[in-house]
């Protein structure tokens, strides 16, 4: 198999559970880690339950790893102290461990909330300034900047994926734009893992939806082509539906309902 041992953090989470099944063919061993219980190890799996904020544990986690999929952490808005421990300290611990262990590449689950304060009338690319919509988004900005530093200083490659909304299907009108199917997520991860050189790349993780806010031109070298589309779910959101008003803050900004949480709220 192409890799000896892939470390997947956040393995007990929504995406972690999907990836656990789907990335098996890529490595002899998948090391699954989370702070929450992950269940029994299956063939070709190792399970390590630990807190990303625990530096010693994270350094041990990296032994004999040759690719990291860093999906662990707090995945929605929360108080700063919780986000600081899991996402800021946690991601720092991952990169220090990666550096010490000599791991060459990381795929980092960043988020669209790094740019949640752009408007839904904007069409943005990865070279435009970050505009996070809360402390969660700020923590993902930290992860993106940290990974760029480790690339510039040490040559450790990272693909940051600004995931849109990766769930079984869109559950609100905003997700018609942000929907990222599980199949497309796995395909983007495959491109991120197997493209020979990625340097430091930022890619928007989104399916081939009818409407788009995100221009992926600076990730074109990954060769990713989304195959799915939220169009398949258009019947759930007819034009006649009952949606937030055009002047509602959740309609104006790309971050949607995240604009109503956290210290960044402005009326
Ligand atoms: P999730 O919340 O279901 O999974 C995250 C996992 O991280 C959980 O199992 C949790 O126990 C674990 N975790 C939290 N704090 C931890 C700590 N201190 N130490 C170790 N593990 C810890 O989230 P989901 O949807 O699976 O997302 C996975 C990653 O992708 C997250 O980093 C999230 O921010 C990112 N993402 C997901 C999106 C989506 O649409 N599902 C959109 C944008 C980003
Ligand atoms: C995210 O970053 C979250 O992790 C996920 O739970 C969704 O809220 C997603 O963004 C989204 O914007 O739909």
Image (tube, rainbow, N blue to C red):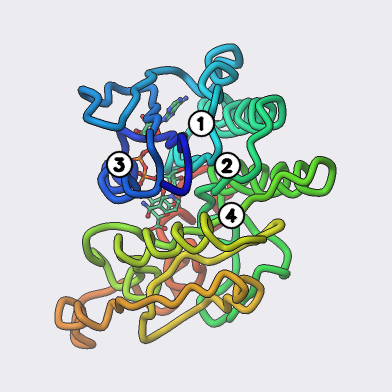
Circle 3 sits on which residue?
20
Along the polypeptide, which appears first: circle 2 or circle 1? 1
Q: Of the residues under marks 2 and 3, which one precedes in the sequence?
A: 3
Q: Is residue 199 left or right of residue 223?
A: right
Separation (CA) of disc 4 from disc 3: 19 Å
Crowd band around label 3 with a 10 angstrom C-alpha radius: few (<14), some (14–19), many (20+)? some
Q: Residue at x 43, y 43 (%)?
A: 76
> Reading the chain from its start, which is encountered first: label 4 or label 2?
2
Mark 1 and mark 4: span between their CA atoms? 24 Å
Between disc 1 and disc 4, the foreground one is 4
Instruction: Pick out the residue farthest to the left.
Output: 235
Q: Which mark is residue 198?
A: none
Could you say whether the residue bearing mark 4 is in a helix, strand or loop?
Answer: strand
| Mark 2 vs mark 3: in front | 3
- Read off the residue under disc 4: 160
Residue at x 57%, y 69% (from the top left corner) = 222
Residue on which the image places disc 1: 79
Q: Residues within 10 Å of mark 2 (few under 14, many from 20)?
A: many
Cα distance in 3D space between marks 1 and 3: 29 Å
**In the image shown, does 264 or 88 lie closer to the viewer?**
88
């Amino acid at each position: 198999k192409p890799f000896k041992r892939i470390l997947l953090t956040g393995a007990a989470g929504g995406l972690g559970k999907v990836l656990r099944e789907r990335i098996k063919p890529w490595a002899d061993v998948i090391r699954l880690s989370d702070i929450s219980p992950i269940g029994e190890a299956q063939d070709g799996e190792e399970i390590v339950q630990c807190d990303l904020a625990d530096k010693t544990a994270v350094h041990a986690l990296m032994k004999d790893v040759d690719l990291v999929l860093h999906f662990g952490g707090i995945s929605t808005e929360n108080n700063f102290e919780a986000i600081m421990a899991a996402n800021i300290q946690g991601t720092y611990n991952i990169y220090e461990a990666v550096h010490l262990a000599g791991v060459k590449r990381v795929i980092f689950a960043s988020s669209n909330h790094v740019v949640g304060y752009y408007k839904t009338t904007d069409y943005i690319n990865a070279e435009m300034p970050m505009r996070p919509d809360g402390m969660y988004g700020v923590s993902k900005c930290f992860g993106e900047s940290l990974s760029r530093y480790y690339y510039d200083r040490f040559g450790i490659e990272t693909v940051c994926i600004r995931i849109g909304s990766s769930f079984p299907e869109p559950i609100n009108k905003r997700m018609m734009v942000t929907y990222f199917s599980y199949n497309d997520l796995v395909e983007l991860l495959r491109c991120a893992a197997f493209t020979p050189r990625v340097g430091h790349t930022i890619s928007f993780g989104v399916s081939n939806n009818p409407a788009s806010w995100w221009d992926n031109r600076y990730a074109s070298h990954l060769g990713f082509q989304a195959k799915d589309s939220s169009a398949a779910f258009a019947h759930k959101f007819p034009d006649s539906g009952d949606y937030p008003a055009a002047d509602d803050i959740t309609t104006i900004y790309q971050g949607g309902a995240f604009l109503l949480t956290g210290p960044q709220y402005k009326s």
